[in-house]
C-alpha cells in the first residue's frame, strides 16, 4: 500500500517558507507503482533472498521509466513514485513497467505483480519532488487498483492517443479527497501476447472481470 511518505504532505502541497516563491505548475503524468506479493516472498524465501528479488524488480521498473523519458521521484520499500512528460509517455511507460514485471516474475518464478495509479495534470516540481492535486489523485487510484492493474481517470485518458484509448474501459465513479466532483475511474489494459515485444501498439483490451466487477458492484 502506498505510504503517506510518498506524497509527503497531507494535501499534496509543499511547506512554503515565508517570502519563498514556488515554480509555476506544469502538466505531467504522475504514477504510483506498488509491487504486490512481497509479504509472501519474505515468508517463503527469507529476508535476504526476497530483498534481492524485490531490488531486481525495482531496477527493471526503473529501466522502463527512463526508457519512456520519465523520472523516478522516490522509492519507499516496494513503492515507486514516477513522473512522465505527458499522458502518452506516462501510459506507455506504466504499460511497459507492467509487462516487464510480469516477464521478470515469470523468469524468476516468483509471485510478484504490480498495481499502478496514473493521472495526468498540473504539478509543482520543486527540489526533485512533485506536489499538487495530481499527486493525490494518482495515490488514490493506486489504492483502488488490484495487483496487475493500471487505473487512470477519464480526463487523463482523453489526453492519450487513440491506440492507448482503445485499451481502456470505464469502471466506476469515485470521490477523491479534496475534490468536489467525482472522477471516472478507467482501467488501462496492458497485457501482451506471448512473444510480442514490450509495446503499446496492440489491439484493445478484452472485456474481463476481476477488480472491475468489484468496483462496479
Image (cartoon, rainbow, N blue to C red):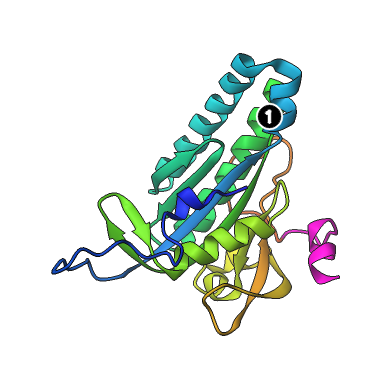
Which residue is outermost to the left? 19
Which residue corresponds to the image point at 54% horizontal and 42% vertical from the top-left? 79
Between 12 and 89, the one lying in front of the other is 12
Residue highlighted by disc 1:
105
In this rendering, is residue 50 above or below 172?
above
Query: How many dots with numbers?
Result: 1
In this rendering, is residue 105 above or below 161?
above
In this rendering, is residue 157 above or below 83?
below
In the picture, measured across the screen, residue 41 lies left or right of residue 60, that is: right
Which residue corresponds to the image point at 52% horizontal and 33% vertical from the top-left? 58
Determine if the magenta segment contains residue 191: no
In this rendering, is residue 149 above or below 100?
below
In the picture, measured across the screen, residue 27 lies left or right of residue 118, that is: left
Image coordinates of residue 199 in percent, x first then y, are: 57, 47
Which residue is outermost to the front? 18
Image coordinates of residue 73 in percent, x first then y, are: 39, 46
In the picture, measured across the screen, residue 23 lies left or right of residue 58, that is: left
Image coordinates of residue 51 in percent, x first then y, are: 58, 22
| Numbered range of the magenta stretch | 205-217
Determine if the magenta segment contains residue 216: yes
Which residue corresponds to the image point at 76% horizontal and 19% vertical from the top-left? 44
Between 202 and 77, the one lying in front of the other is 77
The answer to whether residue 87 of the structure is visible from this angle is: no
Which image quarter: residue 48?
Answer: top right
The answer to whether residue 208 of the structure is visible from this angle is: yes
Which residue is outermost to the bottom? 180
Image coordinates of residue 27 in percent, x first then y, are: 36, 68
Q: Specify few, some or many for label 1: CA neighbours under 10 Å numbering under 14, 14-19, or 20 or more.
A: some
Amino acid at each position: 500500500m502506498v505510504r503517506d511518505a510518498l506524497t509527503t504532505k497531507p494535501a499534496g502541497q509543499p511547506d512554503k517558507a515565508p517570502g519563498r516563491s514556488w515554480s509555476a505548475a506544469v502538466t505531467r503524468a504522475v504514477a504510483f507503482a506498488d509491487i504486490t506479493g512481497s509479504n509472501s516472498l519474505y515468508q517463503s524465501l527469507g529476508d535476504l533472498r526476497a530483498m534481492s528479488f524485490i531490488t531486481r524488480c525495482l531496477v527493471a521498473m526503473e529501466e522502463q521509466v527512463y526508457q519512456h523519458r520519465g523520472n523516478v521521484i522516490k522509492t519507499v520499500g516496494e513503492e515507486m513514485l514516477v513522473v512522465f512528460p505527458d499522458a502518452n509517455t506516462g501510459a506507455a511507460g506504466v504499460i511497459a513497467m507492467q509487462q516487464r514485471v510480469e516477464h521478470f516474475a515469470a523468469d524468476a518464478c516468483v509471485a510478484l505483480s504490480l498495481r499502478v495509479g496514473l493521472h495526468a495534470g498540473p504539478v509543482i516540481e520543486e527540489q526533485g519532488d512533485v506536489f499538487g492535486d495530481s499527486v493525490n489523485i494518482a495515490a488514490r487510484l493506486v489504492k483502488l487498483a488490484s495487483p496487475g492493474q493500471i487505473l487512470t481517470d477519464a480526463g487523463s485518458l482523453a489526453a492519450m492517443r487513440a491506440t492507448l484509448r482503445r485499451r481502456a474501459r470505464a469502471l466506476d465513479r469515485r470521490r477523491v479527497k479534496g475534490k468536489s466532483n467525482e472522477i471516472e475511474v478507467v482501467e488501462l489494459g496492458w497485457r501482451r501476447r506471448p512473444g510480442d515485444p514490450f509495446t503499446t501498439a496492440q489491439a484493445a483490451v478484452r472485456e474481463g472481470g476481476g477488480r472491475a466487477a468489484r468496483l462496479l458492484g
